[in-house]
Image: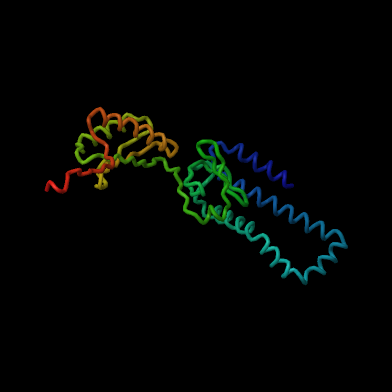
Amino acid sequence: MARGIRRLVGGVLARDKDVRIDRTAAHFTVRISHAVVFLVALLFYAHMVPALRSLGTALLASAGILTVVVGLAAQGTLGNLIAGATIMLYRPFKVGEIVQLQTPMGPETGTLERTSLGYTIVRTYDGRRVVVPNTVMAGQITMNLSSPDVLAVIDFHLAYSSDVTKARTLAVAAAGTHSSVTAVDRCSLTALGETGMILSLRLVCESAASVYQVRLDLLEIVNQRFDDAGINIAYASTTIDLRDARSE
């Protein structure tokens, strides 16, 4: 029966060309159905065998203690199961959407590949699979980057001697030539530091997948245009006064 449910759901998803059915919910439902089928089969088998029926009656008195022991032993598994049900209930993200999450190695961005009873799997852009327990997935802050328009921010550190107006014109013009940039939101000074000024270029990109490449491309293009135009990049420097104190 479990195999029949899997085939039935697979056939329905195959005919759903317009993707009207949530893939995450479908896969999650199949796994819940498997667990229910095996549980019902076990109960039916125990009811059909008289020896098991009498044994079940004898164990009924200790069911409370057994429940506590099993709960303590499988609290991580049960926590992942409940967290998975919570994710399915609130549906903050779906299979195929692009998400950014925190890992021990730092933030990771990728496509949500699958959500099972215990784990959520995210496929990164370089092909790695990040496996996240559902308790972690439900408890951490996860950014859903599947909006049609995604904002990218690129900061340029300029020396105080640089012409801000000219630098802004060059940055905006370079952004307008990139095929993955749909619009320039703004380009303005955002901070004045000890070594120079920060010019922030805010862009609207066509997708979250293109943001990383847009930043790489424009960092190189804009810095080259700044160099050609004589616009200096800010850098830390130290001035040492070597005058003899006796000459003062």
Relative to 227, residue 194 above or below:
below
Measuring from the top left, give residue 93's x and y in whole percent: 50, 48
* Number of callouts: 0
Along the line of sight, the residue nearer the viewer: 187 or 81? 187
Residue 14 appears left or right of 70: left
Measuring from the top left, give residue 166's x and y in whole percent: 21, 34
Residue 126 appears left or right of 69: left
> What's the colour scheme?
rainbow
Residue 227 appears left or right of 103: left
- Residue 114, located in which quarter of the rendered image? top right
Residue 13 appears left or right of 236: right
Relative to 193, residue 76 above or below:
below
Relative to 62, residue 201 above or below:
above
Measuring from the top left, give residue 232's x and y in whole percent: 24, 35
Tell me if I can see residue 186 in this picture: no
Relative to 46, residue 228 above or below:
above
Along the line of sight, the residue nearer the viewer: 27 or 165? 165
Tell me if I can see residue 181 in this picture: yes
Q: Residue at x 70, y 54 (%)?
A: 36
Q: Residue furthest right?
A: 51
Measuring from the top left, give residue 16's x and y in whole percent: 58, 38
Q: Residue furthest left?
A: 248
Q: Residue furthest top?
A: 228
Q: Residue furthest bottom?
A: 61
Q: Residue at x 50, y 41 (%)?
A: 110
Q: Residue at x 27, y 29 (%)?
A: 225
- Residue 175, located in which quarter of the rendered image? top left
